[in-house]
Image (tube, rainbow, N blue to C red):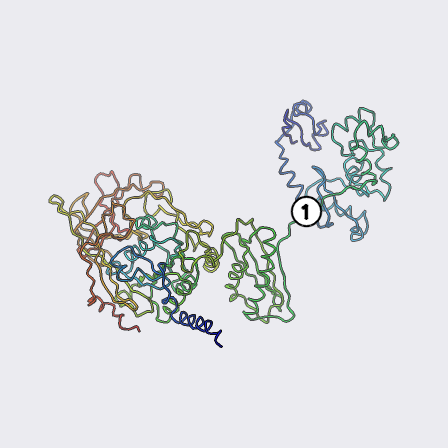
Amino acid sequence: MLHYHDGRRLTVLAADATAQARGVRPGMSLAHARALAPDLHATDGTPDADRLALTRLTEWFLWLSPIVAPDGEDGVWVDTAGCAHLHGGEAPMMAEIRRRIQSLGYTCRLAFADTPGAASALARFARVPCTIISPGTQRQALAALPVQALRLAPPETDALLRLGFRTVGALYDTPRAPLARRLGGTVLARLDQVLGLLPEPVQPIRPIEAIRERRSFVEPIATAGALATVIAVLVRAICETLEGRGEGARLVDLLCERVDGTVQAIRIGTASPVADPVHLSRLLDERIPIIEPGFGIEAMTLVVTRAEIRGAAVPTGELVGQDDVPQGRSNISCLLDRLQNRLGPGRVSIMEPAASHLPEFSQTRCPASGEKGTISADRACSWPRPVRLLNPPEPVDVTIAGPEEPPTSFRWRGVHSVIRAADGPERLHEEWWRSADPYGVVRDYWIVEDNAGERYWIFCRAPLAEVPPAPPDWFLHGLF
Amino acid sequence: MKRHDPDTILLLREQIARIERHHGASGAGRRLATGLDDLDDHLKGGLLRGALHEFCGVRQDRALCARPAHFAASILARHPGQIVWLSGTPLDLHADGLHAAGLSPGRVICVEAASSGEVPALCEDILREKGLLALVAELDTPLTLTTSRRLQLAAETGRVTGFLLHRPAHRQRDRPLPPSACHTRWRISSEPSILPFSPTALIPPPGPPRRRVELLRQRAGRPASWLFEVPEHDTPYSVSLASPVANRSVASPSSRHLHVVGAGAALP
């Protein structure tokens, strides 16, 4: 059983067959339901998720008919006019629908009628789960149904019940004018809609279609120039659609159908939503060499597999460059996309600061997208740091004068350097959570200058407190 | 006939401009000032935009190219715009180090090619892209003359300045750089600093680092060499590589360093 809070108390939203057999009804308070069935299993209802699921179920019904709409909170309305003969009549069609819905794991009640209102009423209140009424007979079919079937607001239903109208049929012969004066026009309007005397417009859902363009050719094409022309045409077409929707493509697939029946597919991704034909065709043109036309390509399809809402338009390349200095963020997203598509993921990146004081861990790479542009990374590290780091630090052989002293000479890559000046140490504690080493390993960084004037950034790595002191390891980490 | 004359002259001017490419054009934005007055004076305002500039290190730095990278970063730091740093191997840049050189790491787009063979083609593609400030490419094999001409033309088209850092592979480390179509060629090395007087320390602290900047080759210009002193690293030296000149800048038109590379005469 599901419950929700209606503002005043916890109310039963839905109950399964077992709970209903014990007398639990949707709409009663949770306390009441618990009194009826003490072992009730109650969970929070999720009306939003239910609504979403109903929308998806409605879309699923597009296999049956192009005009479908959700009906209230728990129904789907399908216009099956002209569809029955495809399934061999209304009864076989209903059986087919029932079978398919049950295979999805739902139970259902179905009704075919002339008007949406009548179908809705019959599906919910008829005695049998599947009802088909012949055309023009809704007046008789609905006569025995309760007035709740008219889809009125609760006060109006209550008023009708108070007046003694229990069934829809009771309203047929009642004088209309006094009823309208007493209850407002809605009741009669609903009644007329159900009976088909007033039209009831239904707002069908419009499924969002994937943007795709297809061109088939009279003669198979195989040359790069011809492919580029077709790509330009296709891209222009999809970019118009994207522009109209205010979206940009993030993932685009180009499918080339060959004469021998195979399909060659190219996929390109972009860092930010793109609706610029020049940008997209450049990305696609770069991939032309990997298309194998074989005996020729008969048809090409361009599909926008993923599209996103686009931000404000950005000025294109014509405005920047030339003689003026490009200011701040310039339009290099096309270049970034091309590089990313050509080199593969993770090859185009920018450096981001990371929370670590060890030089090799103090930066991470994150994918570069043209959107971010210039990031002013406020870096607080005011100590001297080399532009390049040796990764991993290279071990060096040192001669040291004494503990806690800089080396007097060292050998790196086969070259012996005598140190004439040294600055340091700058002590960095290694982060124990990164390595398996015991806690308390420190690095003492020295800036040393050799006789030739080369400046090195070397460090001595040793456990802080160890008795007897272990011989420290020396590494070179960079050059200044 | 007469009324066509201005058009003809315009056409001719256009043709001449095309022949001269951007060398004929003038403007303050044509050159990237290095921030070192002596250098800028010698280069008539700085490194030419939309041209290639080669850099190499010496001795231990030959393979690492740390000082040329620092030099390039400190020049680029003075100019707004985005920079692509391209390498055929995993890039070993250090963000804090770039920041210390004055360059905001967020401006640098790191591009790692799968192999160093891809680098020249990628360079050409990136250099053609308008809107970038500069491309810094790390090369482990020197460019052939043809490739460097292609890249030079690409840089002129996109007006992107190319900084080529030579990091020769191990077996080529001792070979001189072959001639190329680059606009300038630089060698950045260091010299022993002047040690401050400290009677107590066994090993004294180093003085301000000294940088020797050698312009080995310049198209339509003379080679030269300078010695700069970088101010103490604990002072924020993000402003420029070196503001004071330690020794009087020793411009050496005699260029006794040229024999090391020997590329100056090989080019038209």
- Which residue is at a point 64% across and 35% down the rendered structure image? A47
Q: Is residue B6 left or right of residue A90?
A: left
Q: Is residue A274 left or right of residue A432?
A: right
Mark 1 — on which chain does it sit? A
Task: Tell me where residue B247 appears, x and y as whole percent.
Answer: 17, 56
Task: Tell me where residue B161 appears, x and y as whole percent.
Answer: 37, 61
Q: Is residue B94 left or right of residue B126?
A: left
Q: Is residue A66 left or right of residue A456?
A: right
Q: Is residue A248 above or below residue A226?
A: above
The quadrant holding residue A200 is top right
Q: Classify mark 1: helix, strand or loop.
A: helix
Residue with the most extreme bottom position: B1
Task: Tell me where residue A52 appears, x and y as whole percent.
Answer: 64, 41
Q: Is residue B103 above or below residue A200?
A: below
In the rendered image, which quarter contains the C terminus of chain B?
bottom left
Task: Tell me where residue B214 appears, x and y as whole percent.
Answer: 24, 62
The quadrant holding residue A28 is top right
What crowding class fits label 1: few (fewer than 14 Cα within 10 Å), some (14-19), or many (20 or more)?
A: some
Residue with the most extreme front position: B2
> Pointer 1: what residue?
A59
Q: How many marks?
A: 1
Q: Is residue B132 above or below residue A80?
A: below
Q: Amino acid at mark 1?
A: Glu
Task: Report the front residue among B159 and A394.
Answer: B159
Task: Report the front residue among B220 and B257.
Answer: B220
Task: Report the front residue among A160 and A464.
Answer: A160
- Which residue is at a point 26% across and 63% down the rendered structure image? B215
